[in-house]
Structures are given as structure tokens and as C-alpha cells.
Amino acid sequence: MPSLEKARIISNSKQYHNLYIMEIEAPKTAKQCKPGQFLHIRSNPGLDPLLRRPLSLYDVDKKAAKISLLYKVVGKGTALLADMLPGENLDIMGPLGRGFSLPESAKKCLLVGGGVGMAPLLYLARELRRGGNELLVLYGVGNEKELLALERLEAIGSQVQIATIDGSRGLKGPLIPPLFSEILSNERIEFIYSCGPESMMKLWQEWAGINHIAGEVSLEEYMACGVGACLGCARKARPDNEFYVKICKDGPVFRLDELELE
Amino acid sequence: MPSLEKARIISNSKQYHNLYIMEIEAPKTAKQCKPGQFLHIRSNPGLDPLLRRPLSLYDVDKKAAKISLLYKVVGKGTALLADMLPGENLDIMGPLGRGFSLPESAKKCLLVGGGVGMAPLLYLARELRRGGNELLVLYGVGNEKELLALERLEAIGSQVQIATIDGSRGLKGPLIPPLFSEILSNERIEFIYSCGPESMMKLWQEWAGINHIAGEVSLEEYMACGVGACLGCARKARPDNEFYVKICKDGPVFRLDELELE
Amino acid sequence: MDLTVNLGGIKLKNPVAVASGTFGYGLEYADFIEPEKIGAVIVKGTTLHPRPGNPGPRIYETPAGMLNAIGLENPGIEVFLREYLPRLRERQVTVISNIAGNSIEEYALMASLLQGQEGIAGIELNISCPNVKQGGIQFGTDPETVRQVVAAVKKETSLPVIPKLSPNVTDIAAIALAAAEGGADALSMINTLGGMAIDINRRKPVLGNVFGGLSGPAIKPVALKMIYQVYREVDLPILGGGGIVNHIDALEFFMAGAAAVSIGTGNFVNPCLALELLEGMEKYMQEQGFSSIQELVGIAHT
Amino acid sequence: MDLTVNLGGIKLKNPVAVASGTFGYGLEYADFIEPEKIGAVIVKGTTLHPRPGNPGPRIYETPAGMLNAIGLENPGIEVFLREYLPRLRERQVTVISNIAGNSIEEYALMASLLQGQEGIAGIELNISCPNVKQGGIQFGTDPETVRQVVAAVKKETSLPVIPKLSPNVTDIAAIALAAAEGGADALSMINTLGGMAIDINRRKPVLGNVFGGLSGPAIKPVALKMIYQVYREVDLPILGGGGIVNHIDALEFFMAGAAAVSIGTGNFVNPCLALELLEGMEKYMQEQGFSSIQELVGIAHT
Ligand SMILES: Cc1cc2nc3c(=O)[nH]c(=O)nc-3n(C[C@H](O)[C@H](O)[C@H](O)COP(=O)(O)OP(=O)(O)OC[C@H]3O[C@@H](n4cnc5c(N)ncnc54)[C@H](O)[C@@H]3O)c2cc1C
Ligand SMILES: Cc1cc2nc3c(=O)[nH]c(=O)nc-3n(C[C@H](O)[C@H](O)[C@H](O)COP(=O)(O)OP(=O)(O)OC[C@H]3O[C@@H](n4cnc5c(N)ncnc54)[C@H](O)[C@@H]3O)c2cc1C
Ligand SMILES: Cc1cc2nc3c(=O)[nH]c(=O)nc-3n(C[C@H](O)[C@H](O)[C@H](O)COP(=O)(O)O)c2cc1C
Ligand SMILES: Cc1cc2nc3c(=O)[nH]c(=O)nc-3n(C[C@H](O)[C@H](O)[C@H](O)COP(=O)(O)O)c2cc1C
Ligand code: FES
Ligand code: FES
């Protein structure tokens, strides 16, 4: 059951450029968390910005009741978050939404994370490994300094393949299937998880379709309530569907066969 | 000529309860300052609160280009000011308004400052002393810990008489003429300056009238522009006057014979 | 401390309601706040037939406010009665149903469907939704139509009927008077102001529907003025809202003339607001020596 | 980069004006910004006779906005022409005069007094001030009266005439059309929304005048919508404003259909805004490959 909590900020610091990691202590919230869910966060007590901001669970340590967030400063809300100091309280609501499903029996899983889209995938990787799954992580960023999750991913025993736009590390180019065709041709992937720009995920959805691989993706949309009460975060599952799914409640994680990406 | 400036915050710290002193470095602004004028300050880059907040010049060191502000946290704007850290920039506009007039020849002046109303009087005292005037300062607060200006006032050679509501120092009671009747009966006051709650200043206006002493007071009103452009900070000089004075431009300092206090 | 309110025949245990469209069908927020403790839960606007709603983006944040163009997505009144109402009844939630029709007849038909349904305390008539093209907005802007809609609905039901007024009119008092003539038991005001935003990168309106409704603290001054005006001119209890995010805001509404208040956008900021705000109000009343909320209603007029 | 605009016959060196009532008589801010560099300075609303204005408090901050009830304090048109205009003329400020009358005749009379005065580029007709009880607001809410006021003014002057529309109406396009029929050369929109605030400690309205006009970022979505609507229905250039505090806001207005923009409350936040904003716009235009501001006007409609 999700809750409202004033979590204490343990650390909050710039990692590179506009990328930050914040660690909070959230006794009520942490123990409820599942990979792929999100926290709905109030970035300031004032009215500008007014609404909460959704952030994924980047990493969770249930024993220590700690949650990590990986965020990119893009506007007012995230800029205010970046200004917060250890010791201050963070007003969080969560965990919310439908997270990733974990395989019933151990599988070989492919995780495809683009940029800050890696945010929900690290915690997922951790839980998958705990379930004995084997992981191949494709991690794409602009340049190698943005590979914030790399160490943790390797520490939990995932095999990581990197792509950077500027070629500073790994393969050079965008995180799309052709770039990894060689690597993937040698793998027997049974399930794919992805998060990142939708156009990128769309290409992986197609790839999965061709290869008959099931999978899940995490989507984004502006949110107000975060719990399915306002019907604001709507999108069509498929262009020809009459009705809309709600990212906050039906998602943010969806099965690849549930919807058509754009 | 007033200017817009991003002043660097040198220090900003709580003195007691909700009282703060901030020191800023403002090369363009400091050199223009006169006692009784004010700065119009943006407390945050966002929209909540939207408008600037007026604060008096508490102390000014023209050589070092430093300005001190004494402020009380009463709402959103002042709370945001209190959160600012040394090294950050403060968006100031000023100095604005008509300040106190300084006597042409040295006089015996009475300064009556209630609570945070002392803010504009310290710098005034400094300039009066520089002009060779003799000062008797009546300083009234709730309890002795609020006597933030006391040391500086004494250091520049003013005679200070204190009143505290709780009797923790000096006379016990509110800063009104009867409390000081004995002290004042021995003084030949030639000019009075006052700032504080208007009801208090009104009693001193009456006292000055009876004793045929000229003087000036500093008033407050909500402000938007701070320069006489919006006509927002209007009040009648006297209840039967048809027209309004503007606190930001015609004041904030007014001669006692210009208006009737409420 | 007496916080009960009789809102045109609806007995509220406290004077704080949650506004239609911001609290789903009453249970979406149940992990955070017990809906049965809230004065009234006004459920999502319901239409005769299911509606898919508008294409996205449907919401967008603006300075101290937000735009929405949900387009009345809802499963239709039958599904509401069959699937949602029983659960609310079970939890003894004070439910006010919010209905929107495409014609006077449709409003009347929906009222007749609600008549006799156990667990519904009253009907809020959405004659002011700016996001539906048929029906919707035009009903709320012409006094004579307002009178007719209200009268038609009143004929079909013995439930208290509360028309919800649009602020997008030249003369709100004229609309309110027409609603009173039609037999309204109370008035709900205000619905959202018409607004829009433009995405300067795409160079297109942000919302899928182009226009949306503006809510949140930004509109509070407008809401207060309209309620203050209507309180002077119309003798009906007012359910007031528009931008309430704390107890001070709520107190302003009572003092302007609201008999009860509703919280919309504020729920998104703090899902516990309806009850936290009540605490703040009680504290104020205690400190200021009020013993009943009634004493505050319209006090700024005297 | 071409930033010049022809606003219904007024040649502006750039498309950013400062709004009436927020920039005094043009020189109050001169220590901070050179008024002659601003596209146009629309001076404080002027009446035939001097007016003392409303009792205080006259202004009050609200979420992302402010209320004002100045009550058109001004020294009267004669003093304006005699004492203020010469100084503005000397500095070669592009001045738009803003006038408010108590009757159609008074508007016409004031227009005739402005006719032939060197240094006035155009007349903005305030038919929408919510703070004056005689005249003022009612002129702006009835299409036929709007047509008559504009026509009467046009008869007396060869200066471009720009009626300033009130947003407090059911159908802004009808008002705009009436203004066009009356012979308006351009439209200015929007004026403030009616609003109020209550002081819960005094339990009274905050403003001396009870009601005031809401301005600032809070109203931006409302302004954008009305401009977008009027752009589609009326073939007149629009001077658009309401809540602009940065160049992104301004770009939204151009894209919605404004030919030029005005800054009101934003001046209080940053007195240099009119020129800083221009820089931001130029940068955007450069980056996006626009060479003339005209190309942006109404671009969100296509
Ligand atoms: C379920 C979910 C999980 C998320 N997890 C993370 C995360 O772990 N780390 C992270 O950095 N970000 C995450 N995001 C995105 C994050 O919520 C937004 O970047 C943030 O809300 C922006 O707030 P802001 O006030 O800084 O920017 P704003 O000022 O609100 O916006 C800045 C820019 O970003 C765009 N934008 C803002 N929010 C969204 C949105 N929801 N969808 C599309 N565009 C938007 C705006 O149009 C604007 O151009 C997640 C989003 C969702 C829906
Ligand atoms: C010329 C001038 C000089 C000033 N100098 C100082 C100074 O040196 N130190 C200092 O501490 N304060 C000073 N003030 C007062 C100071 O400007 C206000 O306390 C401040 O603006 C409050 O802002 P806020 O956002 O914290 O409070 P808000 O949230 O705006 O208001 C908090 C409370 O204070 C009231 N309030 C706010 N501003 C005013 C006002 N201008 N007049 C009356 N009531 C108001 C509000 O009604 C509310 O009850 C001065 C005011 C003026 C006009
Ligand atoms: C997302 C959203 C959906 C809404 N849906 C409805 C609705 O279905 N029916 C209705 O009468 N009002 C609807 N409203 C209006 C609210 O009930 C309320 O009147 C308005 O938001 C003003 O109050 P607020 O400022 O507290 O949000 C909706 C508002 C929002 C923000
Ligand atoms: C303090 C103040 C005084 C105003 N006085 C006038 C006026 O005299 N005449 C007029 O037509 N508009 C007047 N207005 C309205 C502004 O010109 C402008 O239309 C409105 O504030 C909306 O723009 P903004 O949100 O950028 O402020 C005034 C606004 C303010 C805030
Ligand atoms: S954010 Fe409200 S329904 Fe998803
Ligand atoms: S604050 Fe604008 S005139 Fe004084």
C-alpha cells in the first residue's frame, strides 16, 4: 500500500552535467517498492511549480529503508530538487503505478536503457538477479560520463554493453537494434525490458516482435494525481483504439503486446 | 540614480527567533544610498511570490560597497530570503524612495524605533552622527534578545534608552511617550525620527506636536513597482484629503506635518 | 465545534468536499485518505453513454494552476451505478453525483436514473464543462437554458440539485438567479476558466483539445469574487471552490459566502488536504472563538 | 532580423509594449530602462477630469498574480497633455494614450483633445477597467456599446484606435467583432480578470474597493485562449498581453495570434523586462530560422 511520507534526504549531488542522484530514507515507502513503480514528489512547498513530479525508483534498499533517485534537471521542478540539501525533508507519495513483472522462472533478460531511462532499470536488474535471472544490459548515453548506473549494474552481476553517441566508450551510435545486431545474434534472449525515448523503444518493440520475444516498457506522460483519479495522463494503447490507458495506474509499465509505441 | 543589481550575499544569518541580518556586496547600489531609502528585492527567481519586497537600508558601508539588511520573517518572501546562502546573488533594485532629511546644522535628535522599525534608523543614526548631531535613541522591543542594533548604535556614540515588553532590559512596557516622560523632560529635543508600528508613531506624532518638535516618520504599504509607476502604495495624507500620496515615491519617509497617522 | 452543514438538503458531516473530476470515483485515493471522512465526494462527471475523452496531452501545468481537457472520459451512468456506487455505499461515503448531458432531455433522463439510488446524497449538474462541444458549455452561459435544465432535472428527482456554474460569463449573478428560479437547492461554483497554452517548440497548442479549463490557486481571486457577488444576490447555499490549497484559502471562501467548500487541484498536491484543511479551520475557529462554521459564512459582507 | 510591426497604423520599432497602468507616464522607470527603446509605452489610463482613485489597499499579491484596484487615479487629460506628454515627446518615446470615459460623449471628447497632439502614436480605449463604477466595465461587455464607443472615437481622430477588451465576458469574439465594426484599427487584449481576496484576520475584503483586477502569470492561459479565438474570427492586429514575464511567454502570444505584446505586471518583477525579453525572442528566432516577427504571428493555428 502506497503512502505519503516526508522522507529525509541523505544525500543529493550532481553526478555529471544535469544528472543528479538523491538518496532518501523513507521507512514507510521503501518496504512497499517494486521495480518500475514511481514516486510522486513535491519539489517545493510553494505554488511554483504546483504539481508533483514523477520519478522512478532508481535503487531501493529495503533493509536500510533507503531509496535512490536518478534524475535529470530539465525544468523548474527538477531544478528545485537539485537545490535540496541533506537533512531536509522530501514530500513523497508512493510507490505508485504498475511496475515490471518478474519472470516466474529464471530467464535470460535483455534490459535496454537509454540515458536517464536507465532510472527504473537498475532496481529491476537488482531484483531480476535476486531471482536468478541472467541479464544483458544495453546501456546507451551521449558520452561515457553519463554512465552513472554502470558500476552498480556490474556489481550485481549483469553483463553490460555500452553505446555512446560520441563514441567515448563502447559502440558508437544510438541505442537501436542494428548497432547491437552482432552481439544479439549470439544471445538467446527470452524477455526484454526497456525505458528511454519512445522512438527508441519503438524500434526495440519491432525487434522483439520479429524475434518473438515478450517484454515490457516504461512510459511517460504529464501527471497530476498519479493514482488514476484525474484521467490526465491518458494515451491510446493503439491509434485505432477508442479508449485510453492511464500511464500512472495502468502503467507506467506496459507489456509490449498491449500497445503500439509512437 | 538607482539601479538594478545582482548583489552578492556575504552573510545571512538568524539573529534571534525570526530576525535575520543579511549583508550584501552591491557596488552599483551602495554608493547611491541615503538613510530611509529602501531596496526592492526579488526573493526568488520563480513566480511564488511574484512581486518584489521592500526592505530598508539597515546599514551601509559605501567604501566597502556593503549594505546590511535587517529583516523579520513574516511570510513567503522573507522566508525565502532567510534560506539564501552566502555566495548566492540577490536581485535588488534601488535605492528607492525619499529618505530622511539630515539637519543642516547639528541638532539634538530623538530616534524612536520599535522592533524591526529600527531597520532604517541605524544607518540614519550613523549619518546623523557623522554630521555631528547628538542622538537619543529610544529602542523598544519585546525582549532584550531583539535588541540587534544596540551594539552598533552605541559604537557610533548614540545615547540609547531601552524599553522591553517583558521587562528583560530597560524600562518595562511599550515604546510610547509616557514611558519615557521622565527621561524626555530633561532633554531639549530638536527633531524626532521614528519608525515602527503606525499606532506607536501616531503617539509620538502627538507628543511632537505638543512639544512643537519637527520630525519625520517612515511608513509601510504593499508595493508593486516601488517607483511610482503603479499607484498601488497609496494612502491619504489626511483623512479629509481627496488625493493620495505614494509611499514608494513621496515616501517612505514623510514629515510629521505632512500627514496624519492612523 | 459544529462543522456540519446542510447544503440545500444534503447533510454534510463537515463542510469540505472534493471536486468532481479530481477524485475519480472516490476510491482512487483511498490509500491516502478515507473517503468516508470527507464532507462529500463529488465523483467524476458522468454522461449517459460512455465517453473515451479527449486525445492527449490532457493536462498541463501553468503558473500556480493547471489546464485540463479530459473531455469527460467516463464509463457512462449505468456502469457508475452498477460498479462504482455499490463500493462507495458500502464504505458509507457521502456521494454527490456529477452529471453532464448533451440536451435538456438527457439531463432529465440521467436525473431519473439517479432517483431512488441508495447512496447518492445529491446531484451536481455540470452545465459548465468547457471541454465538451455538444452540450456542455453553452448550457451554462444562457440564463434561460440554465433555468430550463434545472427545472427539468428537478422534475425527475427528489434529490437535492446543485448546478455548477461556469465562470466564463459576463454576469454570473444572472446565471445564478436563473438556476434559483429553476429550483436549484444550492449552487456549486466555480468550474474552470477557459484557457490554453502553446508549446513554442512544436509551435502548436499544448493540449490535444487546444482549449482546456484552468484550475488551481491562479483562479482563486476570480472564484472568490463570483461567490461574493452571488452570495449578495441569490438566497441559496453555495458550494465554493477554485484554487483552495490550504485552510486559509478555505476560510476566505466561507467568509465570502460559501456554505461549504470543494477542493479540486489541491488534491493532486496533497491527497490528504480535505482532512488536513479541516484541522486548520478548526484551530482557527477555536482561537477566534467561533463555535459553528455557519458563523463564518458570509462574514466578510458585514 | 525584422522586429518592426505595423499595429493598425502605428509603426513600432519592436513588438514589445508596456501596458497601461504599469508604467506610469513613461518616465518613472527611466533610471532602469530607456523608454524610447521600448516598442510602445502605453501610459496610465487618463480621464477627462482628474481622479483621486480608490482608497487603499489598492494592490494585493495572489498566487502567480496580483489584484489591483487603483481606481484610475490620474491628473486628467489636460495635465497629461501639458506636463507629461512634452517630456515623452522630447525623449521620442512611442506613446500610446489610454483613455477611459464615463460616457460615449466623454470618450469622443477625449479623442478630439488628443487629435493633432504631436507625440501620440495611437489611442488605446479602456472600455474594460473593472475598478470604475460609472462607465468603465459596462462599456466593454455589450457588443453594441463597444461598436458605438469605437465609432464615436474614430469620428474625432485620425489616430489609430485600439479598444482594450475585457476578458470578463461570455463571448469575447462578439465583442471583438463589434469593435471591428466600429472601425477599430487594432485590438488590445486582455485587461484584468475580476477578482478579490479576503483578509481572514480582519474578516473583510483586502482591497479598499472590495473587487479588483487580476493580472500576472496566473491569467496567461485565459489571455492566450481569448487571443487565439479572436485571431480566428476577426481580421485586426492584436496587441496581446496578460501574464507575460519572459520571452517564452511572449512567443506563446505571438504564436496564438498577437501582432505585438504588452507587459504589465512583469515590469514590477523586472523593470528591464521589455528589452530583455526582446533579446530572448531574437535568440529564439535566430536559432529557429525566422527572419521577421511577422512569421511567428498566429503560427500555432496552422
Ligand atoms: C512514471 C515516470 C517516471 C519518471 N522517472 C524519471 C526519473 O527517474 N528520472 C528523471 O530524470 N525523470 C523521470 N521522469 C520524467 C520527469 O518526471 C520529468 O522530467 C519531470 O517531471 C520534469 O519536471 P520539471 O519541473 O523539471 O520540468 P518542467 O518544467 O515540467 O518541464 C521541462 C520540460 O520537460 C517536459 N516534460 C516535463 N514533464 C514531462 C513528462 N512527464 N512527459 C513529457 N515531457 C515532460 C516539458 O514539456 C518541458 O519541455 C519520469 C516520468 C514519469 C511519468
Ligand atoms: C519601505 C519599506 C521598508 C521596509 N523595510 C523593512 C525592513 O527593513 N525589515 C523588515 O523586516 N521589513 C521591512 N518592511 C516590511 C517588509 O517589506 C514586509 O514584511 C515583507 O514585504 C513581507 O513579505 P513576505 O512575503 O515575507 O510576507 P507576506 O506573505 O507578503 O505577508 C505576511 C504578512 O505581512 C503582511 N504584509 C506584507 N507586506 C506588508 C506591507 N508592505 N505592509 C503591511 N503589511 C504587509 C501581510 O498582510 C501578511 O499578513 C518594509 C516595508 C516597506 C514598505
Ligand atoms: C483534471 C480535472 C478534471 C475535472 N473534471 C470535472 C468534471 O468531470 N466535472 C466537473 O463538474 N468539474 C470538473 N473539474 C472542475 C473541478 O471540479 C473544479 O470545479 C475546478 O477544478 C476548480 O477547482 P480547483 O481550482 O480547486 O481545482 C475538473 C477539474 C480538473 C482539474
Ligand atoms: C496596477 C495596475 C494598473 C493598471 N491600470 C490600467 C489602466 O489604467 N488602464 C488600462 O487599460 N489597464 C490597466 N491595467 C491593466 C494592464 O494594462 C494589463 O492589461 C493587465 O495588467 C494584464 O497584463 P499583465 O498580466 O501583463 O499585467 C492595470 C494593471 C495593473 C496591474
Ligand atoms: S495522473 Fe491522474 S490519472 Fe494519471
Ligand atoms: S509601489 Fe507602485 S506606486 Fe508605489
Image (cartoon, coloured by chain):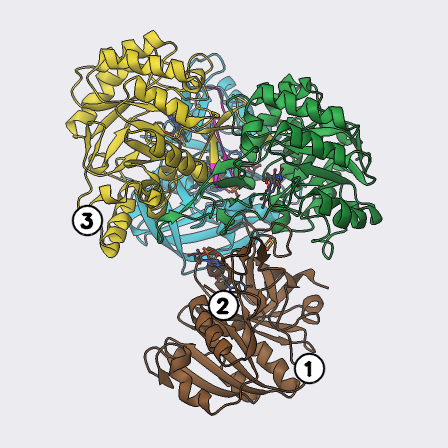
Chain colours: A brown, B cyan, C green, D yellow
Q: What is the CA distance from the residue labelled 3 to the residue labelled 2? A: 37 Å
Question: What stretch of residues is rendered in magenta?
Answer: D54-65
Kind of element beneath mark 1: loop
Q: CA distance from mark 2 to mark 1?
A: 31 Å
Specify the subunit that label 1 lies on.
Answer: A
Give the label on residue A104, or none: 1
**Subunit ID for the residue under disc 3:** D
Circle on res. D291: 3
Whether residue A129 is visible, yes or no, is yes
Marks 1 and 3 on same chain: no
Mark 1 to mark 3 CA distance (whole Å)? 60 Å
Q: Give the total number of marks visible in the rendering.
A: 3
User: Residue B62 location in percent, x, y?
Assistant: 32, 49
Q: Is residue D58 magenta?
A: yes
Q: Of the residues shown, which amino acid type is indicated by label 1?
A: Glu
Q: Nearer the viewer, mark 2 or mark 1?
A: 1
Query: Same chain for marks 2 and 1?
Result: yes
Pointer 2 or 1: first along the chain? 2
